[in-house]
Amino acid sequence: MVTGLTTSGTGSHSHGGPSLETRFGSLFAELAEIGRRPDGSYDRKAWTPEDASARQWFQSQASRLGLACEVDRNGNLWAWWGGPGAKAVVTGSHLDTVVGGGAFDGAVGVVAGFAALEHLMRLNRPPRRPIAVVAFADEEGARFGVPTFGSRLMMGQLEPAAVRRRDDGHSTTVEEALRAASLDPDALGADEARVNRIDTFIEVHIEQGTDLAHADYPIGLAESVWPHGRWRLSLAGSPNHAGTARMRDRHDPMLVAASGILGARQIASDDAVFATVGKVAIKPNSANSIAESVDLWLDLRASSDVILDAALEEWMAAVRKAAQPHTVDLNLTCESRSLGVGFDRGLREAIRELAGHRPVPTLSTAAGHDAAVLASSCRTAMIFVRNHTGINHARAEAATLEDCAVATDLLAAAFLRLAIDEPAEGV
Ligand SMILES: [Zn+2]
């Protein structure tokens, strides 16, 4: 299975018990039961009953392994091996999914964490510094439109006041959802003491593209995360009857929305800018009415912050021009914005070395991750697992257990090196 690591890594084959692949597979199968819809896709949006079941699963894994489990002030779940003292080496990802998401996004990172720890526990060598598995709350932002909710609040990158009253479109606010999950919304916010306890964070995640599949490598290491953001464009026209309002008298926001959607494609390119309008809200959304208003959301990612700003400018200029002849008012609001992030080169090279003879290519990603949020305060790395379809946030996400086990073994090797072999003072 993981031939490159039997000597330089954790020695997967020499300590008896199930293989990492089997261990990963059985843990993953348990989690994959939760929130699966009849069509095979997932719905584990944050703070829903499905999310609660996944969090329950996390807690049961922690107690099965004898790890101290806690929920922090921002709803993130932690399972600790080894007490306080030295700074910790942490792994994990998230348990929530988008609506109609796949089985692997987020889940792979949490399962890999537990499987790696379980594997290391069999070595009977207590860690010299604490090791933790974390599941960050509401990473996807699928319900309240606030991605990387738990990690950004913890890091002080998100103001609690800015999110508490957001609603999910079905009249439940963040505050209400948190209270229903037995969390105190008044306690949300920067958690400096916790952040200061983290020395290193390594996130295992399914690749969101086909670079690894095309190059035929099971895993890769992330070099950077592109800057990205979400903007809401509100277009206000005049509602009227589709059968009586003369064409030349209309102020139809749908026409401007159409220009915005097509305009996003105009500013995009494969190598520098990804631009998407994936959500539109039409009022009143009636077949024989001229719409009163249309809101559309632009998801924009670019290879640099300067390129991203320029792309947004270009898009807005085109939308303004399109709005003019129809006398439609427009209002642009930034809902989230994350700067570009480069991961720690030293940590990346140390992990690559642990892979021995196995080549581990370096990748960039245009998707946001909790690891990128943490990168400003601790050493961070991401290990990507080959995705055979390259599809993400849909049921067609596909990784093999064998590839997941390769990533898990490398994660375990990193823990062995950073938290068990090395004296805690040395790092
Ligand atoms: Zn994810």
Image (cartoon, rainbow, N blue to C red):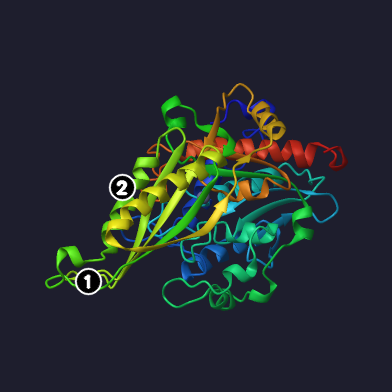
Q: Quadrant of the C terminus?
A: top right
Residue occupying image coordinates x 55% and y 27%: 361
274 and 176: which is toward the camera? 274
- Give the left or right position of residue 130, taking residue 268 as reference: right
Residue pointed to by mark 1: 286
Confirm if mark 1 falls within 8 A of ligand 1.
Answer: no
Q: Is residue 173 something one can see in this rendering?
A: yes
Labels 2 and 1: the sequence-earlier one? 2
Q: In the image, residue 316 lies at what x, y percent?
A: 42, 51
Residue 201: mark in rendering = none
Residue 422 sits in quarter:
top right
The three-letter code of the residue at mark 2 reads: Leu
For disc 2, the marked residue is 262
- On the rendered structure, is 94 left or right of 197? left
| Residue type, label 1 | Ser
What is the x, y in percent for residue 136?
Answer: 60, 58
**Residue 366 in view of the camera:** no
Task: Farthest residue to the left: give it.
Answer: 243
Seen at 62% across and 63% down, the residue is 59
| Badge 2 density bin: few <14, some 14–19, many ≥20, Cα 10 Å | some
Residue 362 location, quadrant: top right
